[in-house]
Image (cartoon, rainbow, N blue to C red):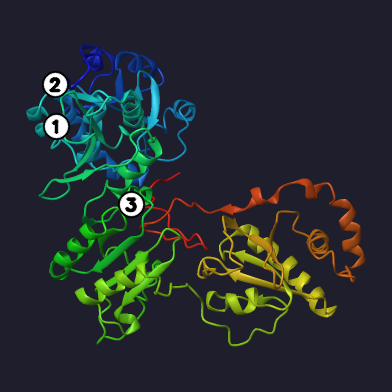
């Protein structure tokens, strides 16, 4: 069995003369190589495979990574796989040249070509990643004994074989291996195998086999199959594996628990459900005490102060449209094995009502700018007899704050002239636009301004200059059937002439963009509308 290309280990004898060790806090020689502007290029030439950490001494996340990185370097030194680091507070230009814009940044250089490392920042994950990188893209296996050993050498191992003559499958398999080698291990059985493509999942105590039965020449279909079966049957979700669940593009069922004892009481039920719905829905458990923000985002009211009412366990299904279906004691619902089974069955029967994030309905809503909350979106926007001009904003957004007085003045003019338009605003960080609503739309940044036509629910996004004149021009363009025009003050008419050219600028680029990298979990949660997401476990500092 061919495991490692010998070219990976060229020039290891240059290690000491090229870099030299440095003293750790315990005065022991560190295995992490220190690179500078003078030695960086030479290192890339000398080491065909080199992982480099770009960091700054003041970065708290860099400090947390340091011992993990050192441990990984010590273990990988056994395999002659070097790890290196660059202090960006010293070699700023070097870091800039390597497109480093956050700390820490880890990049793998293969024959001098960089590839961003996006995996967990624990030593075990880094070690596994580097050893995987040292293997051939596809490891060729010659017999069943090699197959047995190889399929247990990583968390997820993908094996192809040539049961039938199909040169295209071999090409597709190799291409996918090149694309996914950062995360999975690929092997090819030259001898006869019972199927052409099998995934060996080694999460937990027992190995599970997922057999692919689709088109062997369809790379997209194979990729989808891999991603849908890359996760444990029922496992814990966290910063190390959220990407697997995101890329699966399947509904995700969360069990929130606050103790191992509570988890144990549900494990058999959830394991059974997960096997029944394998490849259709993923099931996970999550530490409710460690990630309360995720519970809030998914629709569980953690503010309940009733000491007699325990928040946990709770169960939530989030579908691929980011709709959330909550089963929680805070909704006076019993959460047990039977209710979870029923909840899942009703989900697939489309009989559950999704949770919609919403602020409380305002006690008074008589101002010129109408306040829209999630629970009233359908009433105030979708069912409005008048066209609606809606701003979705964030309280912390600087552009939103700058727009606020203009928006209020525009609404005052509309109200004073009894112009047929409803001007409204909605806090996009605490309210959802119902995803199945006829007037739904995606929010990708703040502020987002949309015109929603009454009855037809036609939606037009506004990206012009944020002035009264430009807003009025946009409305007149959308309401061409209207015989009356919104009258502006004289100074605004003069401004309209001055801003004609400026309206050619796409102000959508001025928005505070929302990172739509999909779900799970984050220490700081950002809620958006419609395609509501939380940025996954962000830990980088600028």
Separation of residues labelled 1 and 3 (CA atoms): 25 Å
Q: Give the image location of residue 199, x and y in percent.
A: 22, 40
From the viewer's perspective, tell me whether residue 385 is left or right of residue 477. Answer: left
The quarter of the picture where residue 466 lies is bottom right
Q: Give the image location of residue 308, x and y in percent.
A: 24, 87
Mark number, residue 1 = 2
Dot in front, 2 or 3: 2
The quarter of the picture where residue 460 lies is bottom right
Question: Which is nearer the eye, 104 or 353?
Answer: 353
Mark found first going from the N terminus, 2 or 3: 2
Q: Is there a contact, CB below 8 Å, between mark 2 and mark 1?
A: yes
Q: Give the image location of residue 362, x and y in percent.
A: 58, 83
Q: Is residue 44 above or below residue 377?
A: above
Separation of residues labelled 2 and 3 (CA atoms): 32 Å
Question: Which is nearer the eye, 276 or 291?
Answer: 276
Which residue is tagged 1? Answer: 150
């Amino acid at each position: 069995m061919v495991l490692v290309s010998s070219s990976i280990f060229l020039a290891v004898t240059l290690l000491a003369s090229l870099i030299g060790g440095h003293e750790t806090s315990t005065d022991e020689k560190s295995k992490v190589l220190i690179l500078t502007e003078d030695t960086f290029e030479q290192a890339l030439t000398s080491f065909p495979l080199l992982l480099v950490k770009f960091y700054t001494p003041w970065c708290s996340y860099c400090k947390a990574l340091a011992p993990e990185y050192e441990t990984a370097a010590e273990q990988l030194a056994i395999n002659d796989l070097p790890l290196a680091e660059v202090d960006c507070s010293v070699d700023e230009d070097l870091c800039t040249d390597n497109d480093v814009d956050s700390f820490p940044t880890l990049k793998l250089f293969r024959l001098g070509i960089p590839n961003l490392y996006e995996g967990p920042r624990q030593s075990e994950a880094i070690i596994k990643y580097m050893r995987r990188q040292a293997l051939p893209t596809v490891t060729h296996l010659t017999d069943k004994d090699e197959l047995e050993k190889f399929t247990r050498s990583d968390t997820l191992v993908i094996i192809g074989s040539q049961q039938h003559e199909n040169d295209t499958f071999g090409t597709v398999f190799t291409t996918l291996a090149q694309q996914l080698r950062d995360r999975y291990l690929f092997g090819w059985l030259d001898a006869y195998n019972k199927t052409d493509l099998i995934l060996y999942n080694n999460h937990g105590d027992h190995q599970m086999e997922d057999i692919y039965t689709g088109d062997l020449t369809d790379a997209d279909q194979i990729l989808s199959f891999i991603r849908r079966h890359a996760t444990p049957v029922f496992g814990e979700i966290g910063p190390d594996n959220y990407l697997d669940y995101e890329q699966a593009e399947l509904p995700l069922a969360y069990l929130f628990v606050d103790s191992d004892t509570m988890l144990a009481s549900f494990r058999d039920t959830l394991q059974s459900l997960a096997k029944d719905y394998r490849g259709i829905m993923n099931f996970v458990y999550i530490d409710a005490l460690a990630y309360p923000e995720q519970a809030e985002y998914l629709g569980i009211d953690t503010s309940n102060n009733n000491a007699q009412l325990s928040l946990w366990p709770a169960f939530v299904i989030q579908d691929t449209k980011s709709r959330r279906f909550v089963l929680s004691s805070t909704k006076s619902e019993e959460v047990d094995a039977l209710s979870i089974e029923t909840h899942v069955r009703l989900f697939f029967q489309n009989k559950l009502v999704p949770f919609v994030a919403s602020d409380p309905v305002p006690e008074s809503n008589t101002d010129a700018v109408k306040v829209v909350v999630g629970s009233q979106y359908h009433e105030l926007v979708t069912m409005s007899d008048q066209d609606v001009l809606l701003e979705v904003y964030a309280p912390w957004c600087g552009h939103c704050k700058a727009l606020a007085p203009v928006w209020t003045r525009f609404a005052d003019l509309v109200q004073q002239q009894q112009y047929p338009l409803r001007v409204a605003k909605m806090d996009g960080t605490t309210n959802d636009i119902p995803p199945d609503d006829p007037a739904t739309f995606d929010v990708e940044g703040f502020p987002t301004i949309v015109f929603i036509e009454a009855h037809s629910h036609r939606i037009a996004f506004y990206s012009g200059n944020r002035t009264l004149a430009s807003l009025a021009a946009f409305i007149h363009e959308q309401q061409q059937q209207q015989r009356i025009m919104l009258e502006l003050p004289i100074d605004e008419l003069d401004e309209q002439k001055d801003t004609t050219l400026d309206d050619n600028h796409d102000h959508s680029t001025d928005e505070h963009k929302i990172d739509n990298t999909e779900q799970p979990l984050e220490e700081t949660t950002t809620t958006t509308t419609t395609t509501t997401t939380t940025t996954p476990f962000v830990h980088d500092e600028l």
